Image: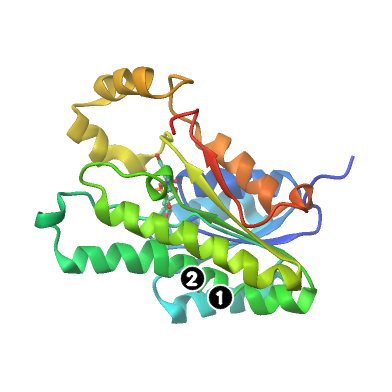
Amino acid sequence: MPSRLDGKRVVVFGGATGIGFETVKLLIEEGALVTVGDLNVEAGAKLSDMFQDSICFQKCDVSSEDDVRALYAQAGEFGGQVDAMVNCAGMQISGEADALALDDWNRIMAVNAGGAFLTAKHAIPYMRKAGKGSIVIIASTAGLRGGPEMTAYSASKGAMVAFGRALAMELGKNKIRVNVVCPGWTDTAFNGPVIETLGGVDARDSMLKVSVPLQRQAHPREIAQVNVHLASDESSYVTGQSIVVDGGLI
Ligand SMILES: NC(=O)c1ccc[n+]([C@@H]2O[C@H](COP(=O)([O-])OP(=O)(O)OC[C@H]3O[C@@H](n4cnc5c(N)ncnc54)[C@H](O)[C@@H]3O)[C@@H](O)[C@H]2O)c1
């Protein structure tokens, strides 16, 4: 039986760990060749060992237009086309607004919102040339609702949601689909500092029991499954959406 992504070329940013890693793994299981850009070169080397000829890893900071441009040049050499792009790269800085440094605000906006812009911007020429494509942007439920000490992160994720919606309107005529995925609590290293603030893993689990209808966090593969659905032709009539994958939290 053919797999969902046989012969497809996909670019994944932030694919070295967590949700991005699970997305890369699932894309490869489904038959895709994947170019990965991430800051974490150690985890990137492990990916290359693990997936060998199915993957091409290059160091890339999504807030640098030169890095993103170079990553797409590499993807062009690796596969000659870009059928889909999934941006999982992201960072978090928490703290009360009146204690937040402007440099921290600017950095989080540059990586999360600016990264969404740059990674999509440089995918478009490939997709226009192919006459179709799928752009998947990983934001967060934090982009749809607020939370204490989350102003910068929420603002950056809200910008990603709005950017994705507007871009979908712009690119529909080119048969390029754009969707945003908004995960809730997901079991990756990303939440380490927040868990510490909450008082540890047990406190986190008690909080999840009362606040999440499914009473648990997501495994990163549960987010990856939605990402891969949106990257593939299975979702051929879905565009301009913010898909919430949060166990019912919001
Ligand atoms: N874990 C959660 O609970 C959760 C919830 C909602 C949204 N998210 C979002 O999901 C995405 C993936 O997070 P994760 O949970 O897998 O965490 P993670 O830390 O495992 O993954 C983030 C990846 O992005 C990479 N990265 C960070 N800054 C980068 C940059 N400037 N350029 C390129 N790569 C960079 C990291 O090296 C890492 O591989 C993030 O955008 C995060 O905001 C996570």
Label 2 sits on residue? 117
Give the quadrant of the N terminus.
top right
Label 1 sits on residue? 121
Instruction: Give the residue displayed 56% in from the left and 61% down from the top.
Output: 165
Q: Is residue 62 visible?
A: no
Q: Quadrant of residue 240?
A: bottom right
Q: Residues within 10 Å of mark 1 (few under 14, many from 20)?
A: some
Query: Marks 2 and 1, Cα distance to the nearest angstrom?
Result: 6 Å
Q: Amino acid at mark 1?
A: Lys
Total label count? 2
Instruction: Give the residue displayed 20% in from the left and 46% down from the top.
Output: 149
Q: Quadrant of residue 40?
A: bottom left
Give the quadrant of the C terminus.
top left
Q: Quadrant of residue 157?
A: bottom left
Q: Determine whether 20 is above or below 247 in the image.
A: below
Instruction: Give the residue displayed 14% in from the left and 49% down from the top.
Output: 96
